[in-house]
Every structure is written in C-alpha cells, then in structure tokens.
Image (cartoon, rainbow, N blue to C red):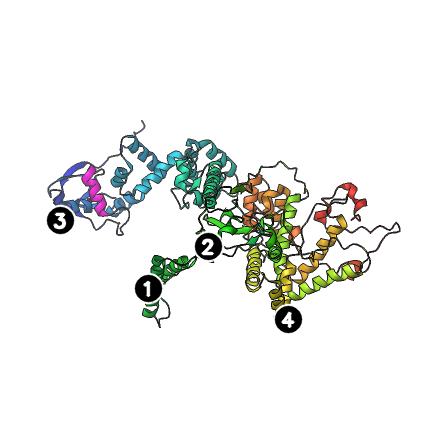
Amino acid sequence: MAKSAQKVTLSPSRDIPFDKLVLSQSNVRRIKAGISIEELAEDIARRGLLQSLSVRPVLAEDGSETGKFEIPAGGRRFQALSLLVKQKRLAKTTPIPCIVRDATSAILAEDDSLAENMQRAALHPLDQFRAFVALREKGQCDEEIAAAFFVTPQVVKQRLKLASVAPALLEHYAEDEMTLEQLMAFTVNPDHERQVRVWDAVKSSWNKEPYQIRRMLTETSVRASDRRAVFVGVEAYETAGGTMLHDLFQGDDGGWLEDPALLDRLVSEKLQAEAEAIATEGWKWIEVSLDLPYGYSHGLRRLSGDPAPMTDDEGAAHAKLLAEYRALEEEYEGQDEFPEEIDARLGELEVAMERLEARPLIFDAEEIARAGAFVTLDRYGELAVYRGFVRPEDEPRADADVHSGEQAVGGQGAELSAASSTDGVGHGTVITSAGQALGVNVPDDDDDGALKPLPERLIMELTAHRTLALREAVGRSPDVALTLLLLKLVGDTFRTSSSAGSCLEASVRHVYMSAQASDLNDSVVAKLVDDRHAEWEAELPLGDDAALWDFLTSLDQGSRLSLLAHCLSFGINALHEKVNPYGAGISASGLTRRMTQSDLVAQAVDLDMVEAGWEPTADTYLNRVPKARILEAVREAKGEGTAQLLDHLKKGEMASEAERLLKGSGWLPEALRRHDLAALDDAEGQGAPEPVSDAGQTEDVDLPAFLTSELPSDEASMMASE
C-alpha cells in the first residue's frame, strides 16, 4: 500500500508585545534601500502592519526560552515600529503579529532573512499603473495617491498617462515585447489607431528607439519652439481651439501643436494686424511675407533716417546701467576671471544698454509717403520690420537721376529699425503678401525605383546655392575676378560669334535667383556677401558722382581690386535654366558654356559647397527627389549596407533618416560637386573662333550628365542654336 505524501507544516502565528522583540544579528540586510524608515513608519501608522514579522525564540545558555524573540526577517518593519514607539504614537506593549519559527529548526535564521529579500518580485510598472488608475477611479486625486506612496505627483501623472496608450500596446508591454521607454514614447499622442500603426511599422524595424516613435507620432505636428508658434504664442493657439501634444517623460520644449493649418492662419492674421498697425505711420506700401527671399531689396533705394535721441528717462536709465557696469569692472579688476554670477550680470547690463542704444529711425514725412516697408519673422519668431525702401517707379522725376547709382547698388543688407516717430494715418497704404507657403506637405510618391532626372526646380535651387557661393568666393578673390573679367572682355573683343552664355554678366547685371530654397537667405555665404556689401556701401559717397570719382581714384591698388572683385561677383551666374531650343532664353550650348566656365571659376577660388554651409536635408533635397535618389545619396556617403537598411521605409521616413545619416558626411548632389576639368575646349579657353561644321553650324557641346537627362530627345539637333 502506497504511502501518502507528507504534508507541509507552516509555522504558527501569534501576537507578541513589542517590548519582547529584538532585532536579530542574523538579519542579512545591512545597507539602506527602498523607502526610508520614516516613510515606512508613516505608512504603518496610516494603514497598519500588512506583513507579519518572522521571529525565533531567544534561548538561554541552558537552551530554555527567555521570553524574548529575535527578528531575522522583518528588520525594517521592526525599526519603523520602534520609531513609532519612540514618537509615543505606539505603546511599548502593543501586540505585534509574528510568525514564530522553531528555535531548533534546521533552516538557519540567515536563510530566512535572505529568502525573504531575494524571493520578492518587484511590482511591474504596468501593475502600478493599473493600481493608480483604480485608486483614481475610487475618488483619490493625484496628490493623495502621491502622498500615500511617497512619490511625487509627477510620477503619478506619468503612470496615469500610460492610460493614453492603446490597450493592445499595453498587452505587448506586459508580455515584455516592448520596453518601458518605448511604451512611454507612445503617450505623446493619444490617438490609439495611430499608435498601433506606428508600432506595426517599427516593431520589426532596426530602428525602434523611443525618439523614432515620438518622431513618427508627431511628424504632422509643429514644435512649440518653431518660430511660427513662438510668434503666435501657445496660449493664443489654444484659445483659438488648437490642441497640444506633451511628453511627460522627458523634456519636450513646450510640446507640439497638432493643427498646423490653424497655426498658419493665426500667423497670417497676426502679421496682417502688425502690418495694419505699421500702415498708420503713413507708408505707401507694406509687403508681408513669412520668409523674405535673398535679394528682396535689390533695386530699391533705402532711406537714411536719423536716429531718434534718447528721452530723459532713457538717458537716465542708460547712465545707471553704465555706472553699475563700471563699478563691477572696477571691483573685480585684477582677477583672472569674473565669478559666474558677476559675469552673468555684466552680460545682462550689456544687453540692456545695447537695447537702449539701438535707436529707432526718424524719416522725413515726404519720403515716407513714397516709401514702403517689409514685415516678416526672424529666425527666432520675433517680428522683423524693415522700413524705408523706395521703388524705382515711386522716385520723383527730379530725383531719379541723382539716385540712379544708388538703385544700381541697392543692397540686400537691411537693418531692422524701430517704428518711425512720424505720425501718419496710413490711408492709401497698400498691404500685400508674397504668397509664399508656410509649410510643405511632401506626398509619399510611388516610384518604380528608377533613377529619374532631378526636378527642374530643384536643380535651379541647387545652382542658386552654387551661384551665391561662387559670388561670395569671387568677391574675396580679386585676382580671380580680374582674370574672369579679362576672359569675358577678350571673348567679346576677339570672337566673331556671340558670347552669350558666359557665366559672367559683365555689365554688371545683378542676377536674380528666381528659384531658391527657404534657407538661402540665412546661409553663411549670404551673410558674408551682405556684410561685405554693407562695409563698402558705408564708405562710398553714392549721392555725388564727382565725389565718388574722386574717392575711387584715391584708393590704393589693393582696395580698387577688392572693390572690383566685389562688384563683379554680383554678375556671377552659375544658374541652371531650362533650355529653350526655339530662340527664347538660353540654348543648350550656351548653358554648357556657362556651367563649364563656372567650373573653372570654382576651381580657381577653391569652392567647397560643404564649407559654404550646404547640407542635404529633407527640405533642401531629400524630400524633393525620388526614393531611388535618396538611397543613391546614402549609398555614396555611407555604403551599400547602410542604404539597404532604409530600403523598406516610406518616403518621408526615408528622407528624415537619410538626413540624419548624411549630416556631416560631406555628401553633395552632382549639381553642387566640383567638376575638375583639365581645361576648356581650345576654342573656349583661348578665345578663338568656335569650330563650325561644314554646314556652318556651331558644333554640339556635351552637357553634364545631370543636365543632359533633362533635354527633350529632339534637341540633339538643336544644341548649337543660340
């Protein structure tokens, strides 16, 4: 007959007065961890003792029980109870629930202590979240929950925020199929369907980092740090009915605005309101644009207003700031460096004084009536107003000749001036908008993977970047500029054929870039050109031709050459244009000559578009080309293996990831690369007559590969027509 299995016997429990308990030296916990004894004591005082102490009788030398009990497991609870007794919140004789182990047990006291601490499983964050939700549903607020569990209200809010994650994703997390960081990333957008779509897209991807999940959930939103959002203000946006996305788990720079269309409307309305306020100053016209293109003020005469004097209050405030500044400098004179707080204060004083010293300009009322202003946003989201520009058609007839030279060199570099002090009613002011788009939605194109030619507009924008970079480089290279001028003049003098198509408009005619990317105006080379132009403009006596003649003759040779280089640089034309074989515009051979000459100039000035500040971003290139071109760029910069990692992505995701991979790589599209030509064709390089065929037609000239692909097939026979 089989024996029955031996039953498990549990140690008995009993209540033991607190003053009969002592902490055992067999307790293995020595290092403080978890919540403090004080917090545990408060929790016991609030809810009572949830777990009994594990004790053993203390034996005398003869093996008899002494009536005392030692605690090998439950030492922190005992210390918390001791604190309550010490605070007289618990009586010394209070019965404490205990599990009494046999003093002669084969299991050591240290074994009990170690097992109790090691066999405990920490609460899963999802269980904690669900428990917080249950407490919230039963009427407790965030602060009450936080106080009960000794955490901050922010921690409670973060855990409760997990309620905005789709239940299906919570189950994935419960099964350890995603990390807590990934789960937290999904809380940024409460749309459950979108959350599931994003998880389905990234779960098998090599890139499923939390930042990628956040990016995909917010890619149709606008950051609160965007200049449009800064200009309008998040509060105004929310008042208008706009909704926000926030990330409670990490810094989000103010969050994301979910309604770009509403934001753009608010920006337009606020710019319009600002323009109407400025119209009261009496300007003839006001141009409103979110982005002013590079060269927006070309051909316009800039009024030279007089700085408004400081008021008595402003003068007193400036004197007070200056006195404090000098006192701090004297106090810390002789020290190697200022203390951090003093250095910060000096910086604040400098900014405050500069703000007072930047005086608004006062314009003549008669000039205001014929001039206008530009209203736009700067890169920081601040309103930027550029006042005092006169269009050629608004010049008085008597003044037209006097200012003709000023119109020819009217520069781009306009400084922001404050409001004119001239009163005006603004009646008749014409307020217009350039109509430029405030945002671009890039569709996900379904291309067949073939390498299609670059879009015509994109090539024009890329060559606009190159033209401006060449302009800047030639402007600081007098010798190259002189050689280029001689090349053009010799060609004009000794060639029997037309010299149309040269990369130098030696008239000099300012070349306007009709197609340009939004970042061109703020580029490094644009600032260099504008700064150099402003320096020369400040020295030249432009209002009097006789005085200007005397000034130019007084310059040393180096200065004359530098001025020549600067003026010639405005004629640089390395722009791609659409070839028109029927006579209007530029011919194929003319375009080839222009681009080939621009390559010679680029080599001479050692042009590097990477150093000039151009980078392939989603806006400037990657979202403008098919997926095959994006993969080609990554392949050339990072190798075939990296390109293959992007092959499965959608167009927008591929462009964003490619931008990250290409940053700092130095990769350039073909239109911006240097073409290291040995020399021009003999006819081109020496100024000799162009070779002609028996039929007396100019011979065909091969276009670069990225331009040839743009030509219609029937243009091969028309390459020479000019």
Q: CA distance from mark 1 to mark 4?
A: 47 Å
Which sits in the foreground, 661 or 132? 661
As drawn, which residue projects farthest toward the front?
Answer: 398
- Dot 1 or dot 4: first in sequence order is 1
Extent of the magenta region: 36-48
Count neighbours of disc 4 (C-alpha within 10 A) and say few if under 14, some if 14 to 19, many if 20 or more: few
The amino acid at mark 4 is: Gln
Q: Mark 2 sits on what residue?
A: 362
Q: Characterize the magenta stretch by its predominant secondary structure.
A: helix
Q: Mark 1 sits on what residue?
A: 324
* Disc sitting over residue 288 in the figure: none
The amino acid at mark 2 is: Ile
Q: CA distance from mark 4 to mark 2?
A: 38 Å
Between circles 2 and 1, the one closer to the viewer is 2
Q: Is residue 40 magenta?
A: yes
Q: Mark 3 sits on what residue?
A: 60
Between circles 1 and 4, the one closer to the viewer is 4
Q: Mark 4 sits on what residue?
A: 557
